[in-house]
Amino acid sequence: MSVQTDSEKRKQISVRGIVAVENVAEVKKAFNRHVHYTLVKDRNVATPRDYYFALAHTVRDHLVSRWIRTQQYYYDKDPKRVYYLSLEYYMGRSLQNTMINLGIQGTVDEALYQLGLDIEELEELEEDAGLGNGGLGRLAACFLDSMATLGLAAYGYGIRYEYGIFAQKIENGEQQEEPDDWLRYGNPWEKARPEFMLPVNFYGRVVDTPQGKKWVDTQVVFAMPYDNPIPGYNNNVVNTLRLWSAKSPIDFNLRFFNSGDYIQAVLDRNVAENISRVLYPNDNFFEGKELRLRQEYFMCAATLQDIVRRYKSSKFGSREAVRTTFESLPEKVAIQLNDTHPALAIPELLRILIDVENVPYEEAWQLVIKCCAYTNHTVLPEALERWPCSMLENVLPRHMQLIYHINFLHLQEVEKRWPGDMDRQRRMSLIEEEGEKRVNMAHLCVVGAHAVNGVAAIHSDILKATVFRDFFEMWPEKFQNKTNGITPRRWLLLCNPGLSDLICDKIGEEWTVHLEKLQGLKRWAKDPAFQRAVMKVKQENKLRLASLIERDTGVKINPASMFDVQVKRIHEYKRQLLNILHVMTLYNRIKRDPTAVNTPRTVMIGGKAAPGYYIAKQIIALACAVGNTINNDPDVGDKLKLIFLENYRVTLAERIMPAADLSEQISTAGTEASGTGNMKFMLNGALTVGTMDGANVEMAEEAGENNMFIFGMRVDDVEELKRRGYNAYEYYERNPELRQCVEQIRSGFFSPGEPGRFAHLADVLLHHDRFMHLADYDAYIEAQQKVSDLYQDQAKWAEMVIENIASSGKFSSDRTIAEYAREIWGVEPSWEKMPAPHETA
Ligand SMILES: *Cc1c(COP(=O)(O)O)cnc(C)c1O
């Protein structure tokens, strides 16, 4: 323990909230009351989990008045509402985040200490809310934090999956999936709102009536809302994340069984409720399952009813306190679609306006366009949603009709602009006619939205030049860029208190809401004392991660080694295989010459493979097998380790980012839309080895290319090589070290008990590699040598670390959200505080 001066202590305390004796006493009282009245225990029989729940309820109490008052304020002021629609919210834990955003962490820490309880141990008992797969779901979670912090009248809408992303177990070097029963012990953060339950229709048929089209003979499932509080940072705002859960109607199936089996009819209620049972575990991959289509529509239908209800019931609507016309809908409602997953919001809003509210078609369609905006997250063809018309026809017959009609009018416009250009009409159609007829949901979104954005500058440019080229020619004004960001509260203040305190010492605490203030650190980049302090925090974070890994895997880690980390979903395009080839290369060099490697490294790879993604699972198995060989080879010692980090998730990311020295961002240029992991590492003082892809490009722009290890093909090089024809053998034959690695994979060097084990992976690398690993191998190995050499000069390394932290301000999701607010939603962010409620809790 180092000795702290009083001023240091005060600064540390101020970011975590002022600690007053009376408040500590109140928290202790509230905690004891919850142990007694909520958990129905006394301290003789209470378990650690009881204490976690008592603590969660104690902290939750501090949200309640702010939550009610924020919602009342929105009702009174009737500002334009922002609706963020997403099939995923990768929230992680809520306890510490809530304490930090409310400014009560210091007080609660002290109270729990006085009660003789270990708060960190209790925090570990909270289940992650893992309602997401990776970057897209975590982005939605960061956006909720920023929208609340910027005072937007925003609502997240999604599905309350009973099972989130599976837990990954590594058994015998392979991934096993376990269901994520995260609600087993109850969820203290959510509040069910049965009074706002809404019906959602499926199947049935459309009939013509004098009053227009009617969707009849449908099967109804109810959507039960569960509200989750989203506190802004230090501004007394609490927004709502509303998650829908499927409920069977009371008479479900009974009318079909009125003479029949009552027991069976009750049991069958489960099938309707399957809609919100489980998150589909694919990242960047479209699996056209009907249950998934029903999930997407369920979320959109329930959400749009809620949006329209709130719009109509505004107290400024009319004298009868109901808005009866819709012309001001676009001044009151902005709907942001997180990828095409909620694309059915477009035909659903159109349907409500036309069929239910009797708005004329053309007027209704213009309202839809003005309200909706669409964010694209990928250009990978296998990820683009293309639902078969036959399936849509069956599940949502009215929507299929509307989509045909939208398409008919859309293609008329194309014909007007480019008469006789049938090929263009085919390319721009919402309906793909090749093979089975399908609806291209991205095309539906571009046509039905007034704004379309990519998630990093390079990605937005690629969209305009490739997948949406024709649409860009037709409507250049629709296309925008919104470079992704991360919330600095969770990804620095919460996960890295040591570094947060150090930064506060130098530049105060404004950076927590104005991250660009980190620029102020640049003047200390060359300061030896500050360099040492930053590296000391890094070392402490590394020791903490090392002991966690040793506890979980038994592998002893050299804490003096460079922590070289690649954590993200396992995917061919992210090229974990390139990383493994580098590790194998270092291993082979050490075996040839024990002095060959100048910098000891601990390479860590973590991430989940979609359960049906065979190659991704093989990549995990290869990483485990290579690690097993290297980690147990006495010739290697602690010069090199390869660890596979089990069950990568938000909570594990919070441990890893602060401890990383090197961040691996090595996707094939043009494939990673943005990346956000790259930003978390940068903010926490890791250096990046990466390709010019996604947001890496803008990171290099901000920090200077001299402060990153950029290597490999650019997008143009990749395109050029594709045109020429990529031939892996050229690279394989030219480089003996590379050849040795590929041969080792092929021949089972790392799987002696099963020589053919990884032959398929070698085959992929040599024969069907869309991501051209071998073309970037030389440049990657060279960049990694530069990394190793630089690590030898710890002062220079520290200088670069500080330059990176100081340059990471652009990547705050506050900046991203302020841009969405002004340039897409037409609302103004505010850093004003709401008045604090009088708290007695
Ligand atoms: C940030 C994050 C991601 C996204 O990482 P990328 O490297 O951008 O793909 C995925 N999973 C978790 C748990 C994260 O926290």
Image: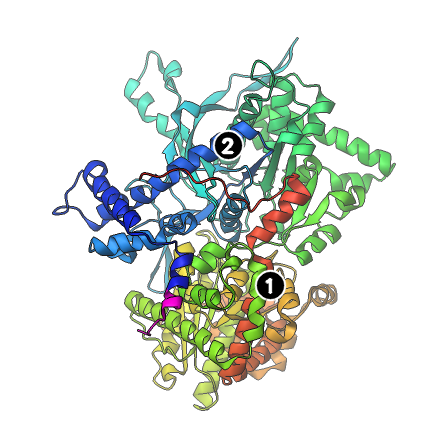
- The quadrant where residue 188 appears: top left
Q: Residues within 10 Å of mark 2 (few under 14, many from 20)?
A: some
Q: Residues within 10 Å of mark 1 (few under 14, many from 20)?
A: some
Q: In the figure, is residue 116 to the left or right of 562?
A: left
Residue behind label 2 places its C-beta within 8 angstroms of ligand 1: no
In the rendered image, the vertical position of residue 58 relative to residue 715, given as above or below: above
Q: CA distance from mark 1 to mark 2?
A: 58 Å
Residue occupying image coordinates x 80% and y 31%: 412
256 in relation to 80, above or below: above
Q: Which span of residues is magenta-colored?
A: 1-9
Mark 1 or mark 2: whose residue is earlier in sequence: 2
Q: From the viewer's perspective, is residue 231 above or below residue 290?
A: below
Q: Amino acid at mark 1?
A: His
Q: Which residue is mark 1?
A: 768
Q: Residue at x 66, y 55 (%)?
A: 459
Query: Does the magenta-highlighted stretch encompass residue 3?
Result: yes
Most foreground residue, 751 or 186: 186
Nearer to us of marks 1 and 2 is 2
Mark 2 highlights which residue?
A: 73
Across and down, in percent, residue 560 comes to: 39, 80
- In the image, taking residue 284 as reference, residue 651 lies left or right, namely left
Element carrying mark 1: loop
On-image quarter of the C terminus = top left
Q: Position of residue 307 (x, y in %)?
A: 55, 28
